[in-house]
Image (cartoon, rainbow, N blue to C red):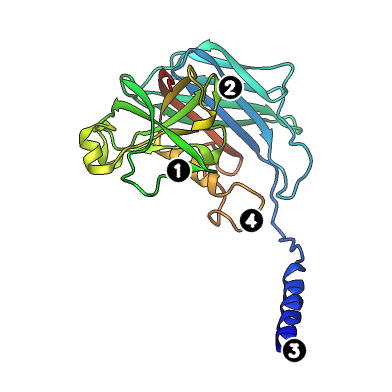
Amino acid sequence: MKVLYKFLAFVALAGVAACTEDIIIDVEEGEPMIGVEASFTDELKRHEAILSYTAEFYNQNEISMVSGATVYVTDGVDTMYYYEDPEQHGHYFTDSVAGKKNTMYRLCVEVLREDGEIHHLHSESIIPDNVECIDSLVVKHFNGMNDSVPTVFLFDTIEWLYPYFQSLPDPNIIYMPMVTKNDTLINDSLRMQMMIAQGGFAGYYVNGPEMLASNKEIPIGYFRRSKLMDGDRIHADLYSITADYYVYFYSLLLSNGSNPMLGAPANVSTNIQPDGEGVGWFFTASVVSAETVFRK
């Protein structure tokens, strides 16, 4: 009988625990601002800027895009304009141009407001220096000296991608790798993105003997062994980014989702000025690339 009572008590408690009520938190909303997602690098390509209006926290409707804006970047000598794609409102592209390393660029955005006034936004960011090259890419098992790096996934062996290159002596430069397999990006979400913050290891040969003795190996991506085929092309772009973008990236990662309790108790940082009129980031970087072919 005591067992029956305990069972019934458990069922009753389970029923109470299963009954949950959604709590709607009253989030104070301000005037809509302009969201800016713009990039400019030293790659010879069409660089993109995406402009949209911010929405209320619980908004379920499609985000309104900013059309008809004037957008350009300048280094004080040359000016490169972004032109709106007629098939994608709010998406602006330059002609095929390339920025220069160690050069400061200023992004300017001009939007005609409903009251007839011009809304001016701007941002400045430098294209950092980058390594001379990536000497090689190697796909292999992890050496097993670091328990924090998993070697299996769903009973499948994990193969890790390791770059080898001479890092720069500047401890403030962050390396952000973008990895593709057969032209398909594998780290296409915030949570799959890896960063290499050299810090005290700036100037080391990444994954070389000295670094192995001090800091173990640093992978930049991984693959499930069963998904790797002989002849797969593995390509890595190593972006050299500024430290403030590194902070922005992780604050965005922590604030991602619908739970207002996640992340810091403040808005995600932005380098769009003036304060309180724009959100987002003007992203600059320099890029070096390498490629390897996987062989079983």
- Which residue is the site of mark 4? 260
Where does the image place residue 254, in percent across and percent down from the top left? 54, 49
Where does the image place residue 232, in percent across and percent down from the top left? 49, 19
Position of residue 134 relative to residue 9, above or below, is: above
Mark 2 and mark 4: span between their CA atoms?
Answer: 30 Å
Q: Earlier in the sequence, mark 4 or mark 1?
A: 1
Which element carries disc 4, helix, strand or loop? Answer: loop
Q: Closest to the observer: 261 or 66?
A: 261
Q: How many marks?
A: 4
- Which residue is the site of mark 2? 48
| Eye-nearest disc, 2 or 3 | 3
Q: Earlier in the sequence, mark 3 or mark 4?
A: 3
Position of residue 231 relative to residue 243, above or below, is: above
Question: Mark 1 belongs to which amino acid?
Answer: Val
Disc 1 residue crowd, few under 14, some 14–19, many 20+, Cα 10 Å: few
- Which residue is the site of mark 1? 247
Q: Is 33 left, or right, of 252 in this rendering?
A: right
- Which residue is located at x 75 percent, y 66 percent? 20
- Which residue is located at x 42 percent, y 37 percent? 195
Question: Mark 3 belongs to which amino acid?
Answer: Met
Q: Is 105 left, or right, of 46 in this rendering?
A: left
Position of residue 121 relative to residue 54, above or below, is: above
- Which residue is the site of mark 3? 1
Mark 3 and mark 4: span between their CA atoms?
Answer: 46 Å
Q: Closest to the observer: 197 or 113?
A: 197
Dividing the image into 4 quarters, which one contains the C terminus? top left
Mark 1 and mark 3: span between their CA atoms?
Answer: 60 Å
Q: Residue furthest bottom?
A: 1
Marks 1 & 2, CB-CB < 8 Å contact:
no
Mark 4 and mark 1: span between their CA atoms?
Answer: 19 Å
Q: Earlier in the sequence, mark 2 or mark 4?
A: 2
Question: Mark 4 belongs to which amino acid?
Answer: Pro
